[in-house]
Image (tube, grey):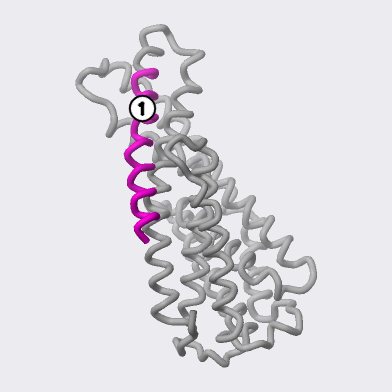
């Protein structure tokens, strides 16, 4: 994979790109936090995405980071992202239930299920907003600003981007391909989920590297985004099936029957998504 000059030069030291990536990620996270404080749509999701992008960059450049600061930062970002996870998941699941229910289902049962999911969503969203607006998040944002200005790095971070980035990006692609190659239509849900996370890691890594590597890295990001989209839809169906299954033990028999029908539909929806991903992946 050849390097070409992008917004930063191929000769630019990696340490400059690392600082830029952390600064950009910190600004993105700060904007998302403000969105939450203003009660804007999709705000919680944007906080989660911002955390994931930052964690991905810390992993991408792991070999260049000196000291424990990056480990601590990844941990803080992970906790913040996890605090936003339940609300986002319930939002997606409720939307899928609306989409999947049909005229064959008892409308009162469907409404009851949606009310349960919505009540859980509202509670989760309130907890998420409290965490995002808390002191710990404020400290995290200040930490990001500080490390972006002067990250603790190893000497090899002085190497030029054009020498280093192709290898870093290729490594992320190879890890993804190694796991994606193992997928079969009957592979367990958790393995499909793991490949989705790896596709996301490739996408974020390629986005960062495209600043220097240009079109080739951008093309890798676009392809990874296609994989991520399909695998994300697959994971949503799995999450919906699991969430509805969890409601069955406490449900009345008639409601449990409706839940069972919905669960089977979400599980059945995995098959065409798996086939579409495998077709796309093996054509690429």
* Residue that sits furthest to the left in the current view: 103
Residue drawn at (42%, 47%) of the image:
232
Q: Main secondary structure of the magenta part?
A: helix
Residue drawn at (54%, 51%) of the image:
179
Please, what secondary structure does the residue beneath circle 1 have?
A: helix
Q: Quadrant of residue 281?
A: bottom left
Q: Quadrant of residue 162?
A: bottom right
Mark 1 neighbour density, 10 Å: few (under 14) some (14–19) many (20 or more) = some
- The residue stretch that appears in magenta: 259-284
The residue wearing badge 1 is 114
Magenta includes 233?
Answer: no
Q: Quadrant of residue 220?
A: bottom left
Residue drawn at (61%, 79%) of the image:
19
Is residue 33 depicted above or below 66 in this figure?
A: above
Q: Quadrant of the C terminus?
A: bottom left
Is residue 98 depicted above or below 11 in this figure?
A: above
* Residue that sits furthest to the top in the current view: 253
Residue closest to the eye, 122 or 218? 218
Residue closest to the eye, 226 or 133? 226
Residue closest to the eye, 57 or 36? 57
Magenta includes 275?
Answer: yes
In the image, 162: left or right of 265?
right
**Residue 190: % across, % down:** 54, 39
**Residue 172: % across, % down:** 56, 65
In the image, 66: left or right of 17?
right
Is residue 237 depicted above or below 154 in this figure?
A: above
**Residue 234: % across, % down:** 40, 41
Residue closest to the eye, 82 or 131? 82
**Residue 148: % across, % down:** 63, 76
In the image, 154: left or right of 13?
right
């Amino acid at each position: 994979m050849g390097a070409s000059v992008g917004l930063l030069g191929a000769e630019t030291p990696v340490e400059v790109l690392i600082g830029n990536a952390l600064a950009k990620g910190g600004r993105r996270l700060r904007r998302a936090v403000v969105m939450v404080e203003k009660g804007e749509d999709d705000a919680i999701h944007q906080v989660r995405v911002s955390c994931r992008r930052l964690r991905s960059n810390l992993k991408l450049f792991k070999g260049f980071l000196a000291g424990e600061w990056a480990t601590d930062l990844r941990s803080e970002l992970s906790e913040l992202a996890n605090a936003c996870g339940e609300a986002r998941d319930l939002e997606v699941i409720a939307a899928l239930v609306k989409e999947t229910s049909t005229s064959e289902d008892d409308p009162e049962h469907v409404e009851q299920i949606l009310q349960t999911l919505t009540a859980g969503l509202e509670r989760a969203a309130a907890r998420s907003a409290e965490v995002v607006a808390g002191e710990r998040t404020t400290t995290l944002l200040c930490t990001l600003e500080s490390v972006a200005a002067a990250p603790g790095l190893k000497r090899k971070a002085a190497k030029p981007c054009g020498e280093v980035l192709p290898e870093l990006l290729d490594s992320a692609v190879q890890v993804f391909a190694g796991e994606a190659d193992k997928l079969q239509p009957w592979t367990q849900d958790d393995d499909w989920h793991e490949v989705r996370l790896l596709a996301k890691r490739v996408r974020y890594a390629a986005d960062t590297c495209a600043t220097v590597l240009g079109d080739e890295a951008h093309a890798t990001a676009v392809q990874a985004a296609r994989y991520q989209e399909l695998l994300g839809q697959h994971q949503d169906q799995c999450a919906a099936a699991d969430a509805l299954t969890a409601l069955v033990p406490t449900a009345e028999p008639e409601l449990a029957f409706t839940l069972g029908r919905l669960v089977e539909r979400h599980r059945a929806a995995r098959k065409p998504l798996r086939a579409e991903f495998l077709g796309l992946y093996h054509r690429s």
